Amino acid sequence: MKKPIITSDWRLLFKPTEHGNYVNDHCVIKGNDDQWHLFGITNHGVGPDTERYFVYGAGESLGGVLAERGKVCDDGNRAWAPCVVEHEGMYYMYYGPGITKLAVTHEPQHWMGHQVNVTGNPPMSVNRDHMVIKVGDKWLMYVTGVKDGCSCISMLTSTDLINWAFCGYALTSTKSAPLNPSWGAFESPFVVLHEGLYYLFTTYTVCAQEDYHNTLVFCSKDPYSFGEYTGDNHGEIVVAEIKAHAGEILFDNGKYYITTCGWNGYNIPFEGGVAIADLEFADA
């Protein structure tokens, strides 16, 4: 088991000027055009209830600042926390809140809404902050939610990226856990495979100043199960704590990176922007 740590200063990756004045939960993907593409929650005002589309930026390198290219998925409804995967030349974007929404495209500038089928999930188990990876012949989806009044990360599986079935909980918590807001304290899950182990990064917050930059990292051999967080088992189950909000873990040219972002006024490294830093998996 390794301990992921930040090993550089933060540097600016993207900052909108035309279509919003901040970026919160976001995703970054390298497209089949060899460009890096970023999609993120934004707004010109204040408050998550008025977030209606994603700002879009792109560029050739993670070492520079991505250029603002426009906005996407502007259909008049709330749009939170996009997750984009590419498969056989098609991009699939999952987002929330509420029911899972899907948009598709062959190129990242223009998206079309598409039907997505989700079966078997109990109430409150799937509501926001999607993350999708492929393991073997299945796609795994991680989403934040609430189970029995406590924070959780739910799981769904698919073989075609359109039809998804609830299969259980990747991470649960209990009443004794430090944070238990009604909407769930686990946010922005991201799972990465490193040297045969799966690392689950999740922001753990009630969106207060004191816990906004609080990402916990869990580790497991099984991508379907990262345990139960009770609070008093913090030292046993949490392998790292990282000062970041809604981070994406990126891999490019043999190196790992992590991003951070957030609302204005919450002491993010670059007000209104997404920052990026080097990440290493060090000996524990």
Image (spheres, helix red, strand yellow):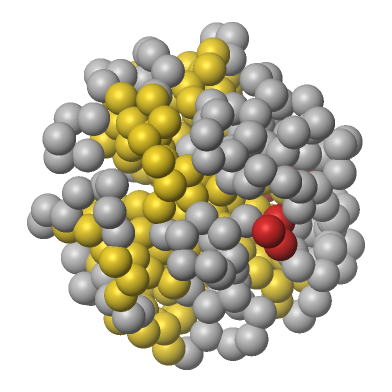
Say if residue 143 shows up in the picture.
no
Position of residue 170 in the picture relative to residue 56 (left or right): right
Q: In terms of depth relative to the viewer, which is nearer, 34 or 139?
A: 34
Q: Tell me residue 5's x, y (percent).
A: 57, 22
Residue drawn at x 48%, y 50% as measured from the top left? 54
Rendered image quadrant of residue 70: top left
Vertical position of residue 227 compared to residue 167: above or below: above
Residue drawn at x 27%, y 70% as measured from the top left? 161
Question: Which quarter of the rendering shows the C terminus?
Answer: top right
Vertical position of residue 151 compared to residue 194: above or below: below
Position of residue 57 in the picture relative to residue 219 (left or right): left
How many discs mark residues in the rendered view?
Answer: 0
Q: In terms of depth relative to the viewer, which is nearer, 56 or 30?
A: 56
Vertical position of residue 170 compared to residue 269: above or below: below
In this view, which residue lies farthest toward the front? Answer: 18
Rendered image quadrant of residue 22: top right
Q: Tell me residue 178's x, y (percent).
A: 87, 53
Position of residue 226 in the picture relative to residue 73 (left or right): right
Residue drawn at x 32%, y 80% as measured from the top left? 115
Residue drawn at x 66%, y 79% as measured from the top left? 124
Q: In terms of depth relative to the viewer, which is nearer, 164 or 51?
A: 51
Position of residue 95 in the picture relative to residue 97 (left or right): left
Q: Tell me residue 188's x, y (percent).
A: 58, 51
Vertical position of residue 248 compared to residue 122: above or below: above
Q: Tell me residue 154's x, y (percent).
A: 55, 70
In this view, which residue lies farthest toward the left? Answer: 88
Rendered image quadrant of residue 35: top left
Say if residue 196 shows up in the picture.
yes
